[in-house]
Image (cartoon, rainbow, N blue to C red):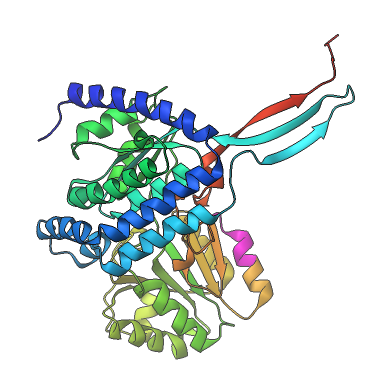
Amino acid sequence: MNAAPDTAAAWLHEATTEARQAAHILARAPDEQRSQALRAAAVALRQGISAILAANAADLAAAPDNGAFRDRLTLTPARIEAMAEGLETVAALPDPLGRTLAAWTRPNGLHIRRVATPIGVIGMIYESRPNVGADAAALTVKSGNAVILRGGSESLNSARAIQAAISAGLGAAGLPEAAVQITPDADRAHVGAMLAAAGRIDLIIPRGGRALVERVQAEARVPVLAHAEGLCHTYVHRAADPEMARRVVANAKMRRPGVCGATETLLIDAAIAPSLLPRIVADLAALGCRFRADPGARALLPELPAAGPMDFDTEWLDAVLSVKVVNGVEEALAHIARHGSEHTEAIITEDRAAAEAFLGGIDSAVGLWNASTQFCDGGEFGFGAEIGIATGRIHARGPVGLEQLTSFRYVIHGSGQIRP
């Protein structure tokens, strides 16, 4: 049953009231209690695996026949175990709260400390990937924040089943279950209510397709932490080790083509393209990849389909790769600046100077040297999980983990000073 806008607003008012109270308790709860909630939630996930898989099967039965979409939506015993392990990994991380970020003493004797604190109430709007709810819960609970989740209609059954495990964990640790809530349905009215909830939600994090993110950024009256697209590039420099380049490009594109860290465009130097590009294309084609090639690439491989006007501006999220031949680092950087989304870029080269020029020349949140772009992931960064990827220039960039879900306040110790 869908929610009318006034019904969604009424639900959100009550939910944010409870979330604010829960956040107040979480912020003051010992780290061990917050961590225990995550460990208990991991146990509940494992115990509830049959119910979670049944809920996911119901979602998949109604899902479109789209390979990349269904991959994002699908849960397996291994993926549920990975969610549980992610909760435990986050639980074991150091407490992000109460850290002294900076400290100094003024000439008048005042000692000033900048101390990490929670942000408050987070609103998380996501689409098909149901594990996002578990990641969001892990990071917000550990960092002392409450979260309100709005999952997509395509993953609603799965999201509810995962939410039940999270609630069980919070209850087992004696923490309020309102610390992690999910909207009662996936109606778009809940999105509108969350975006208008200035003063009740402190930060909105959208995680989904371009249309969702653009709507959030256009309509939100609440601060937003987001990335619009993951249009990632891998540049194979003329000094690349050929076998390394083949391995890395194959992984960067085809490990999971539907994730935002998947490479969408291959750039390859003209000096190495005649010998290496046919082998890279053959590797990828054997894995089921399709191509969109510029004239330079088609001069070497005429059978490749020609790239259209928008292909180098497209986040495929599928087994499709745009290919362009370039002349050196500067041309690669110019292409990325014109077509990229400032998410993740990689260079494959044995030339340190070229690598440093490339990494210093990109404006993206993450740059890699001789590694797959699919390492742009909070778990791979050691964050335990991520609540999203940020490509903006304020507060956080790249994978958003515990540290990025904290703000700070100042604590000042004096000895009776008065201001003249």
Q: Magenta segment range? A: 357-365
Q: Is residue 47 left or right of residue 255?
A: left
Q: Is residue 117 left or right of residue 76?
A: right
**What residue lies at 18% left-to-right and 24% top-to-bottom?**
7
One can see residue 41 in this view: yes
**What residue lies at 40% left-to-right and 84% top-to-bottom?**
280
Task: Work out which quarter of the rendered image holds the C terminus and state it.
Answer: top right
In magenta segment, residue 362: yes
Query: Against 141, is 382 above or below?
Result: below
- Give how far across and how far down residue 163 sits, in percent: 29, 46
**What residue lies at 27% left-to-right and 84% top-to-bottom?**
303
In the current view of this chain or complex, which residue is farthest to the top?
420
In the current view of this chain or complex, which residue is farthest to the right?
107
| Front-most of residues 3 and 40 | 40
Q: Quadrant of residue 230?
A: bottom left
Count of numbered labels shown in the rendering = 0
In magenta segment, residue 65: no
Query: Against 217, is 307 above or below?
Result: below
- Give how far across and how far down residue 130 sits, in percent: 28, 54
One can see residue 258 in this view: no
Query: Against 112, is 41 above or below?
Result: below
| Front-most of residues 396 and 164 | 164
Task: Work out which quarter of the rendered image holds the N terminus and state it.
Answer: top left
Q: Quadrant of residue 351?
A: bottom right
- Give how far across and how far down residue 138 sits, in percent: 43, 49
**What residue lies at 19% left-to-right and 21% top-to-bottom?**
6
- Give how far across and how far down residue 235 sits, in percent: 50, 72
